[in-house]
């Protein structure tokens, strides 16, 4: 799954996009769909070192085409895109250009990965089987193409690396693609074997290379309750709100009232959050929730008007991946603004709530594997 790492580079990419790429080793000819490829004036102009190939999963059950379209459209504002999205029954969609930095897993990974690949998620077993073969072979052949070892998540600093490996060894809090692969019966050891040697496509429907179990929706999803409150500018704290609902008890804040402090806490996992104020811009991330500690326990500065909120939820290890979904209203317009998911890591959702220059008056939050807004 993509982790935001926005760079302020927008320059010409000199690589030429092409169709009908033939992958080496056991991979038969595969056609790249370029409908969502970034143009020559989009994306980073920074070349990569050829040390790793990064394996992701999208963490959202949405068609690969939709994910590619979102990255094409929002690559700069969201600060997130990769070279390839695999899904929809074994299709491969190009977004970024090989050999140039993508914005997919933090600065170290982006600088060292000529190819990063997202695997779109599906509940359909037949579709997954085709996706998995295309995904594995793209990772395998990309590594061979750039002289990178095909070993997965080894202790060496060169090879095919999962986003989890990047989290454990460099930076971040993502665990993909293993949770999704496991939901279809693919273990870490099998994934490592398949990527190392590739899957012969002419035999993939009949041999024993892939032995996924019957797909089921994850059963390890835990209820996560989020409690939060806003502090009225010049006033006091509003009552705590748990999750969200309808009516006046279903959101933090009050209509047409500006706020200056926010606190958020969860009963499982962890959440970080920050606010944007009209006076200061984006303030630092806050990891605690304590109304009595206005320095480290809440986000904001007393007397300074909040006009934006951003947050990121971290799922406990071994549980179904969930995100913070949230939305806000402002004092200057009716109705909720667009729904957000974490800090922009889910395709199709905004990366922060609010509107610059307009005091944020109401906020709703839910922790889930999908949006209920």
Image: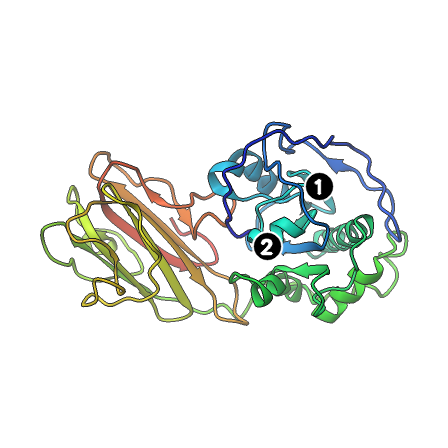
Whole-percent x and y of residue 323? 45, 57
Q: Name the residue at 51% across, 48% down.
A: 5
Q: Is residue 34 placed above or below 232 in the rendered structure?
A: above
Work out which quarter of the rendered image holds the N terminus and state it.
bottom right
Which residue is at a point 68% across and 40% down the rendered structure image?
Answer: 93
| Left or right: 267, with 116 as reference point | left
Residue highlighted by disc 1? 98
Residue occupying the far left of the picture: 235
Q: Relative to residue 222, is residue 264 drawn left or right?
A: left
SS for dot 1: loop
10 Å neighbourhood of mark 2: few (<14), some, or many (≥20)?
few
Q: Nearer the viewer, residue 300 or 267?
A: 300
Depicted 164 relative to depicted 21: above or below = below
Say which element carries label 2: helix
**Tag count in the figure?**
2
- Residue closer to the observer: 258 or 123: 258
Distance Cα–Cα, label 1 vs label 2: 16 Å
Badge 1 crowding class, 10 Å Cα cut-off, few under 14, some 14 to 19, many 20 or more, is many
Nearer the observer, 29 or 146: 146
Q: Are marks 1 and 2 in contact (CB under 8 Å)?
A: no
Q: Which mark is residue 129?
A: none
Name the quadrant containing residue 296. bottom left
The colouring scheme, among rainbow, by chain, secondary structure or one colour, is: rainbow
Confirm whether residue 216 shows in the render. Answer: no
Q: Residue at x 24, y 37 (%)?
A: 358
Q: Is residue 276 visible?
A: yes
Q: Residue at x 72, y 59 (%)?
A: 160
Q: Earlier in the sequence, mark 1 or mark 2?
A: 1
Q: Is residue 122 left or right of residue 78?
A: right
User: Disc 2 designates what residue?
Assistant: 108
> Residue 307 in the image: x percent, y percent?
26, 43
Q: Which x, y percent locates residue 327?
A: 33, 47
């Amino acid at each position: 799954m993509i982790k935001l790492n926005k760079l302020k580079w927008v320059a010409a990419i000199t690589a030429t996009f092409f169709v009908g790429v033939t992958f080496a080793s056991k991979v038969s000819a595969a056609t790249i769909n370029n409908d969502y490829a970034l143009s020559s004036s989009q994306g980073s102009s920074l070349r990569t070192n050829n040390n790793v190939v990064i394996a992701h999963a999208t963490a959202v059950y949405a068609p690969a085409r939709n994910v590619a379209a979102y990255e094409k459209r929002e690559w700069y504002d969201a600060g997130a895109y990769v070279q390839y999205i695999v899904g929809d029954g074994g299709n491969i969609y190009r977004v970024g250009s090989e050999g140039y930095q993508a914005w997919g897993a933090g600065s170290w990974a982006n600088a060292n990965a000529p190819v990063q690949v997202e695997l779109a998620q599906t509940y359909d077993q037949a579709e997954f089987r085709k996706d998995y073969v295309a995904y594995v072979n793209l990772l395998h052949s990309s590594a061979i193409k750039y002289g990178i070892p095909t070993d997965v998540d080894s202790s060496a600093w060169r090879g095919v690396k999962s986003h989890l490996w990047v989290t454990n060894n460099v930076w971040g809090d993502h665990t993909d693609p293993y949770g999704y692969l496991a939901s279809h019966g693919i273990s870490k050891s099998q994934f490592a074997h398949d990527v190392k040697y590739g899957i012969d496509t002419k035999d993939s429907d009949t041999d024993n290379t892939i032995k996924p179990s019957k797909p089921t929706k994850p059963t390890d999803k835990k209820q996560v309750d989020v409690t939060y409150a806003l502090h009225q500018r010049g006033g006091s704290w509003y009552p705590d709100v748990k999750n969200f609902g309808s009516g006046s008890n279903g959101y933090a804040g009050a209509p047409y009232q500006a706020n200056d402090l926010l606190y958020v806490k969860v009963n499982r996992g962890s959440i970080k959050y920050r606010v944007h104020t009209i006076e200061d811009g984006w303030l630092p991330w806050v990891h605690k929730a304590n109304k009595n500690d206005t320095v480290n326990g809440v986000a904001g500065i007393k007397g300074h008007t909040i006009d934006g909120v951003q947050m990121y939820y971290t799922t406990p290890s071994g549980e179904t991946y969930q995100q913070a979904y949230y939305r806000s209203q402002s004092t200057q317009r009716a109705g909720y603004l667009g729904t957000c998911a974490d800090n922009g890591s889910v395709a199709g959702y905004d990366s922060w709530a609010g509107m610059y220059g307009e005091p944020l008056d109401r906020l709703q939050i839910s922790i889930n594997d999908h949006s209920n807004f």
